[in-house]
Image (cartoon, rainbow, N blue to C red):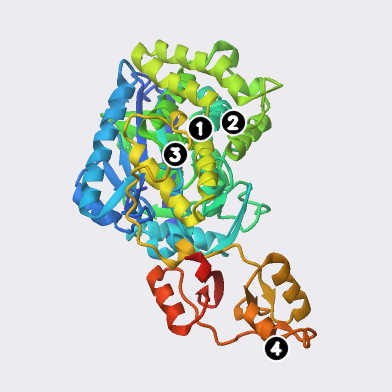
Amino acid sequence: MGHLDVKQLKSPKDKALYIHHLVKDLEVLDIMLKEGIIEKEPIRIGAEQEFCVVTKDYFPNDNSIDLLREINDDHFTTEIGKYNLEINSDPLLLQEDCFSQLQNQIETLLEKAQKAAKKKDSKIVLTGILPTLRLKHISEDYMTDRPRYNVLNNALKDSRREHFNIHIKGVDELNLIHDCVMLEACNTSFQTHLQIDPDEFVDKYNWAQAIAAPVLSCSVNSPILFGRELWAETRIALFTQSIDTRANSFIHNEKQSRVSFGADWERGTVTDIFRDHISRFRSLLTSNEHDDSMALYKKGVIPKLRALQLHNGTVYKWNRVCYGVGGGKPHLRIECRYIPSGPTLTDEVANMVFWVGLMMGQPEHYKEIHNKMDFKDIKNNFFKAARNGMETQFKWNNDWIAPKDLILNELLPISRVGLEKMNVNETDIDKYLSIIERRVKSINGSQWMVNNYRQLQKTKNNFEALQNISAYMFKHQLDGSTVDGWGIFNPDDNLKIDLSRIVKHNMNTQIILVDQNDSLELVSNIMRWKKIHHLPVINKKKELAGLLTWTDLIKLGNKDLLLRVKDVMTKNLITISQEAPLEDAKALMKKHDINCLPVVRNKELLGILTSSDF
């Protein structure tokens, strides 16, 4: 979709024309499959490296377009967020040192991006979800100024007809209603492409579904969003909910989300997979660039099937079917979309090698896997892996098994056989599969991040802890190390955070709120029990209405504790924004001779800053 001039599909005329092209594309694909036109060999691989653009102090930067101009390289393209970019690797033959070649190419391009970013006072970070993301970064103000993103946003909103409801429950809980698709911009992936022989495509696709859970379980890297500990791979839940066109799950023509694992094993041909998608998900976009694919094919020209590719670009299966034309020849690929970006380039390539090896090494006893395993077990495995990473149990071959045992005892050997079958260098095989083995035996990216987040919270607030985690990943993402060897780090070890402290760095968000109509006797006891000197007061609209201080109670004595809070509280408050410089807060408190500043956004209380917080 990124290469097409798209527009929202609205008028009956546009819909009829688009559907006509879509049906013709399916007919031509069927003919090419029957006539053996789709390329069977050689097998190629490729990858899409998404990354985050951040400021010097590791917060999302909104300058991706400026950075793209500075880089000036066709391997790079935009993403929906102003703080994301993507690299598209060159396709490589699956043989010899192809994975080292791929890593070298992406590393060269990332270094080029980092050099350009430095000129723009920015940095680039590889991570599934950038830890320092905040709610303000998911507004439409941070959407990349390219027509196709606005068109997609409007089309999804029109299809849904109400705001997006995000609810993710892990150790903590995230529950919010959002008015656009910008939550998608929180997700950063390392998408892997593998060309597949059309004669075995459906069986290979089902195998890709079966192995998704164990591959994901050791690759997870996105446990934190907006400071909350959620799933081991929160991207899975977030992406599913962030562009769900269904207002509820009982919509008759769309039982599945557009982002899904699937409903059942695939059967038939690859065209049947596309037909199922078209049947389930209504087309949202069209373009003026569609071709008469049948006429082109009859002239001996291999068509690009633009209408089919456009529809396919709005159906986000975690294992996605792709059609493409390279060197004048049509081919089919499986795009593995669930592997996150980061935390290092070497970790990402190891994940890819593991997956590709498994795909090519599929043993005979796992052929026609749709007759041997229950799809719902496989689907359940995938979401358990997303929630818990390695800390779960899978149903595999009608038995229960831990991911560690499944990977070490069965899947790593299968992957090695697959790579050897494709004549991949022994050096590459040993290098990358040993990374997976070490990680499975120690910690993955998600476990590393949670361990350090909890450790840092002992001495720093959440806001600063997340900056330190981002800084550490930036420092080590291209140095050849891997996450299994990182461990707990010391934030004072030369992380070079250009820290301009703002109110949010020091404010306290773990606060107790009371209602203005609460009993003063109750509230005074709460303050005594909890040793609280300043207690924010809210009204029935949940807006900040006042502040009750220990000084107020001392002045009152014990004579009027039957009053309500609003009878005693201070109503004319001095407040401050969380974005304000910390020095401004100090000056404000000194000027007004106060020891507490409520931190607000509009009339919403976000936290409080007291003299002791300095």
Give the residue at x 43% y 83%: 591
3D distance between C-alphas at marks 1 and 4? 55 Å
Tell me the kind of residue under disc 2. Answer: Met
3D distance between C-alphas at marks 2 and 1? 8 Å
Q: Which residue lies under the disc numbered 3?
A: 489
Tell me the kind of residue under disc 1. Answer: Asn
Label 2, residues with CA under 10 Å away: few <14, some 14-19, many ≥20: many
- Image: 318 above or below 54: above
Q: Secondary structure at mark 4?
A: helix
Q: Position of residue 343 (x, y in %)?
A: 42, 37
- Image: 607 above or below 187: below
Asked if labels 4 and 3 touch by Cβ distance under 8 angstroms, the answer is: no
Task: Compare residues 162 and 107 and report the one nearer the observer.
Answer: 107
State left or right for residue 73 relative to residue 497: left
Tell me the kind of residue under disc 4. Answer: Asp
Q: Which residue lies under the disc numbered 4?
A: 567
Task: Compare residues 261 and 490 and report the one nearer the observer.
Answer: 490
Q: Earlier in the sequence, mark 1 or mark 4?
A: 1
Label 1, residues with CA under 10 Å away: few <14, some 14-19, many ≥20: many
3D distance between C-alphas at marks 3 and 4? 50 Å
3D distance between C-alphas at marks 2 and 3? 22 Å
**Quarter of the rendering containing residue 381:** top right
Visible residue check, residue 284: yes
Task: Compare residues 165 and 334 and report the one nearer the observer.
Answer: 165
